[in-house]
Amino acid sequence: MGITVFQTGTAHCKGGLLLPRLLGLALLLGVSGVGNGWASDLPAAIDRVKPSVVGIGTYQETRQPRMQLRGTGFIVADGRHLITNHHVLPDRLNEERREFLAAFVPKGGSQAEARPARMVAQDEARDLALLRIEGSPLPALRLGDSSAVREGQEIAFTGFPIGAALGLYPATHRGLIAAVAPVVMPARSGRELKPGLIRRMRDPYTIFQLDGTAYPGNSGSPLFDPANGRVLGVINMVFVKEGRESALERPSGISYAIPIDFARDLLREQDLRP
């Protein structure tokens, strides 16, 4: 299966007039409410991170739009592997119509390259997946030490907050580590004990709660240290909320991230160096 280069754009996206407004709101929220204490080397960190950020979704030549973006991923290790959220991956593919799982590599403007991908390792309990992509190696991100992350620490994350509606342009948002907290809160009654919640209570771990606004398309984005670009976590906009906010009638606007140390385990399984 080859690598496909194609045009992205708004022609086949729903809600054409609404999407630009959503993007403007996303950018406004991403930069508001933050003081002047940000590291001056954040622009340099963004320059290092962006070439490693890809879209994750499916591609089908005969479909309109051909690309369906489901989330974000980032290149690691040997340049041929990437980390993303497990929930971003499709449950099934339409193989009869030659639909395939793909990493979408931005090529500037409205150009994107669709690289076939396959999952080689997964950690469903922590909503992580390791994919291998076809083609030449891409720039890989360095992984940091998530066990050393402190509350109040400055962070940034880069991804595709509203998908490819306005082209495949990675956007960066910044924030703080608001809390290092358990992935699941105790249920107040038996009615709140759903199967997924019970599984997480049996195997608890900590996650990062963020003071920073992420959107569904950011799922799988790298959470990184703005001082050096090293990855500290993986943005998660669905899975964590099911455990942390199970008692709430409506999900909050709080963003979360899975510590990157859990992704290291997937790399070790494949004999890959972070």
Image (cartoon, rainbow, N blue to C red):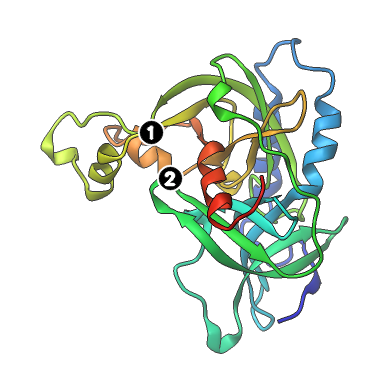
Instruction: Tell me residue 183's x, y (percent).
Output: 38, 33
Rendered residue at 68%/21% (across/down): 32
Rendered-image quadrant of the N terminus: bottom right
Q: Residues within 10 Å of mark 1 (few under 14, many from 20)?
A: some
Rendered-image quadrant of the C terminus: top right
- Extreme front residue here? 271
Instruction: Tell me residue 41's x, y (percent).
Output: 84, 23
204 on left or right of 146: left
Q: Is 15 in front, or is 140?
A: 140
Q: Are marks 2 and 1 in contact (CB under 8 Å)?
A: yes
Q: Is 92 in front, or is 28?
A: 92
Disc 2 versus disc 1: distance between alpha carbons?
9 Å
Q: Residue beneath label 1, please?
A: 205
Instruction: Tell me residue 78's x, y (percent).
Output: 73, 55
Let me know if residue 69 appears in the view. Answer: no
Query: What kind of element bears circle 1?
Result: loop
Q: Picture quarter containing residue 192?
A: top left
Rendered residue at 38%/33% (across/down): 205
237 on left or right of 10: left
Q: Residues within 10 Å of mark 2 (few under 14, many from 20)?
A: many
Let me know if residue 12 appears in the view. Answer: yes
Residue type of the residue flagged with mark 2: Arg
Q: Residue beneath label 2, please?
A: 126
